[in-house]
Amino acid sequence: MTMTLALLAEKFNYYNREMFEGRLPVPPLKLSTARSFLGQLRYKKERRLFGRWRYSDFTLVMSTRYDLEESMFDDILIHEMIHYDILYHQQHDTSAHGRLFRSKMQEINRRYGRNLSISHRLTPEERENDREIRTHYVGLIRFTNLDVALIVAAKSRLQFLRKAIPRVPYVDSCHWFISHNPYFNRYPRAQKIKFYPTTEEELSRYSLDFIPLD
């Protein structure tokens, strides 16, 4: 699904009328290519008297990085609109997804046949739709028992990981490469040691563009 700001505004206004009685003013709407979230409500939080908080300066951001089904995109938008409804009206909930949020979510699911959930989880197939070209620092690890694994390092932690991994028990070798293959977009950028098992056959598919780092 191709999303534009005009279409996002149209969807916001539609669900505002249908599910929120038109009580939500349209906040600034933004599209992002973030991979760390699918939808996000941004706001300022100010402490008031008696331990209360005031919420203001709302912005609703939707990620377009993944090629989602329209129904899932809409569910994520409605999820963020529930947050907006609660905070815009300065209501107090027990937590970010507390009793009030869950009550509103369950009511919308029941009345409108939606599939809203507390968290947004992508399937492996949806993650594979992330085709953005990025620079990856990939470590290929071979163990003494002949198993193979990989790690994709955060650039800021690359030198730390290069020194630390050879000291891990049963690591036979670790070689580092640079790759621009979107295959590696699915892996988190490692801040600490965490190996992801792979196979020699799998390696042969995605290592063609590897540039040795050493």
Image: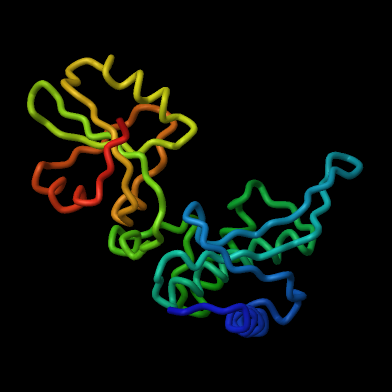
Instruction: Return the x and y of residue 52 as percentages of the image width and height.
Output: 83, 45
Q: Foreground: 76 or 214? A: 214
Nearer to the camera, 75 or 198: 198
Q: Position of residue 13 (x, y in %)?
A: 66, 83
Horizontal placement of 203 versus 10: left or right?
left
Q: Residue furthest right?
A: 49
Residue at 16% across / 45% down in the picture? 203
For residue 159, side relative to residue 99 (left or right)? left
Which color mode does the image show? rainbow
145 or 19: which is nearer to us?
A: 145
Q: Give me the residue at 44% from left, 71% from top.
A: 72
> Image quadrant for the C terminus?
top left
Residue 108, percent from left and from top: 55, 73
Residue 93 shown left or right of residue 117 in the figure? right
Quarter of the N terminus within the rendering: bottom left
Image spot of residue 126 (x, y percent): 34, 64
Residue located at (55% from left, 62% from top): 39
Q: Residue at x 51, y 56 (%)?
A: 37
How many labels, in total? 0
